[in-house]
Image (spheres, helix red, strand yellow):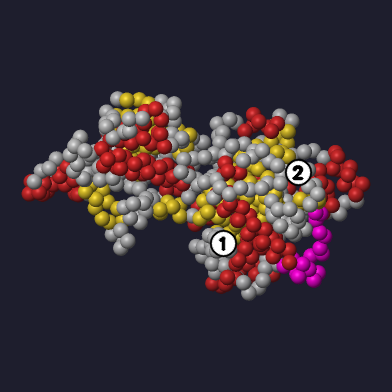
Amino acid sequence: MAIKRDRSLCTGSQYHLPLPSGPYPNIGFVDIMTGSDKNDGILVRVLYPALDQTTDIRTRVKEWAKWTPHDNYKAGYLKVVKLPDPLVRLVTSLSTDYFIPILENVDPLRPEGHEFPIIVFSHGLSSCRTTYSSVCTELASHGFIVFVVEHRDESAVTTFYPSSDGSFKWLPYRHVKLYDNDLPIRREQLDLRVTEIKRVIDIINDIQNGNKIQNVLKSEFKMDQLSGLLDLNKIILMGHSFGSSTVIKSLTALDCVPIGVCLDAWMYPVEENESNLVKEPLLFVNMQTFQNKPNLKRMKDYIGINGTNTTDRKVITIKEAKHTDQSDIPFTLPPPLLWLFGMKSKVDPFVAHDLTTGLALDFIADKLKHIMTGSDKNDGILVRVLYPASDQTTDIRTRVKEWAKWTPHDNYKTGYLKAVNLPNPIIRVLTALGSDYFIPILENVDPLQPEGHEFPIIIFSHGNAGCRTSYSSVCTELSSHGFIVFVVEHRDESAVTTFYPSSDGSFKWLPFRHIKLYDNDLPIRREQLDLRVTEIKRVIDLINDIQNGSEIQNVLKSEFKMDQLSGLLDLNKIILMGHSYGSSTVIKSLIALDCVPIGVCLDAWMYPLEENDWSLLEKEPLLFI
């Protein structure tokens, strides 16, 4: 996944971490602390796409969060490197504050019917919930809700917890000499970390299900705003260093996590005989200067037969990179101090950061499956996507032999004739003798990808006895003006014909349903209309998944790679359009959805609509032609 990078680290007079580059650049956050003492509950930061994605985040720089949320974190970092207390106090008082381009307690984005995948992030030794803010903010900007744990195993640079008197107590970092009979301590810490990961997953379930979260930090944020937004089937564990050990150990203990991502994994605390307990896909993104033979030997146990990469297990190493390059340290320490502490890298920090997040996003997108057309008539969707092609110089007429048929199968020819009640013998003759017509479009060609540009989207709904090709003249014209058009073929028995996958791997055909118009047919029409609106929602889910890089499992086995459209769809510019019955679908969908700003109705058939539907419409602009 290519990342387009703004390299600014200072806005006005304020120093800050890199701005996120994903389709959701405005990120909100809330800190949650549960429990009543050190031994129960959890401290976690939640990062999520904010509702307001139109305001330039740089105009709100004064509202950004501090990288060190309390001076005790500044002191904690300095104590980790064993500076004397007087020097710690001096440096803490004089040091410059760095900021994270995120906004506290803002409303989350709530795309209609969409749930965001989840990342649970575990920090390394001498870190905390903000140490990896560059990576975690970047991930959130690509459509993830990220839960960053601050562990209480004494591996955090510092942390705090509630006490019985209502105050908070601070827990300092524990200095343990590495590789000096410290394995029992590390495994005890690791067990606590896994317990904390389980607590975070419990919180995630509670939030999604609308259960009350008692946040002892007294945040203004209402947790029920995240209810319904979390995809519990798409929980990814990610961690750095000791956090990677936590990922691996947690995968042996949990069955609700489908993917693990390990950043410069520290394998020392991991049991030698547990690799067979991890079945989930794993990605290791290593920094060359940190890895050594014992570490890599242990890692090999987790990446397949004889330590070779498989589809589900990958190890990728960034040459000459330092262990801290995947954290925020290269962005927050001046070069002389990086050199002094042995953290100065030969790799540009933006390059290390973007490689890390890009590799993680690609791996996750490859493993998170979305079924395009489902497994039967009642789920999934059939849709044709029209888009501007990459090649805009060749005359389309020179490729006429590659154009698509207007009737993609003879059953569509038959369907049109049956819709007008022709006798079967005549249908067979006309189907055999009828000329083929073609649409001047090319299947599976690469899309145009203008730098930094997202195309507005049109979702088109056909009328009675129509299908996904019946309005090709209109839809192709719209696409030629810079729209990506998703043409739905409805399965409400209003299509001239359509098809769907069956459990045996074949396709079954669904014919047009003849219903006498205006003869007590209103209940049937409204039932059809409800299904049509459900299918529009599925298309919007599909659009979100394409934009966010989720893999689309197309049961039609197309050669086209849907990730070519990732990053090209403007989710803020979705227009609904339809003809006749499709116009009723537009109006009914506008009532049910809040992510569509415009509706266009072509020769609208208003009969199926409820009498009070018009009053339920909000203020979306509507055009009737």
Q: Horizontal placement of 178 versus 221: left or right? A: right
Q: Horizontal placement of 94 versus 191: left or right? A: right
Q: Of the numbered discs in the image, which one, if any, rests on residue 364?
A: none
Amino acid at the residue labelled 1: Leu
In the image, residue 30 lies at what x, y percent?
Answer: 65, 43
Residue at the image point whose x is 44% and y is 52% from the top: 370
Crowdedness near tag 1: few (<14), some (14–19) or many (≥20) residues, C-alpha within 10 Å: many
> How far apart are the alpha carbons under marks 2 and 1?
31 Å
- Residue contact between numbered discs 2 and 1, judged by CB atoms under 8 Å: no
In the image, residue 139 lies at what x, y percent?
Answer: 59, 47
Residue 321: in sight, yes or no? no
Splitting the image into 4 quarters, where does residue 153 fall? bottom right
User: Which of pointers 2 and 1 indicates the residue nearer the eye?
Assistant: 2
Please state, as top left, top right, bottom left or bottom right, where the C terminus lies in the image: top left
Q: Horizontal placement of 56 versus 77: left or right? A: left
Residue at the image point whose x is 75% and y is 69% from the top: 183
Q: Camera-side residue: 455 or 343?
A: 455
Please tell me whether residue 178 belongs to the stretch shown in magenta.
yes
Q: Of the numbered discs in the image, which one, if any, rests on residue 68?
A: 2
Label 2 secondary element: loop
According to the image, label 1 marks what residue? 282
- Position above or below: 148 against 22: below
Q: Which residue lies furthest to the bottom in this view?
A: 273
Residue at the image point whose x is 18% and y is 45% from the top: 415
Crowdedness near tag 2: few (<14), some (14–19) or many (≥20) residues, C-alpha within 10 Å: some
Q: Which span is picked out in magenta?
A: 171-187
Splitting the image into 4 quarters, where does residue 418 fall? top left
Q: Horizontal placement of 239 versus 559: left or right? A: right
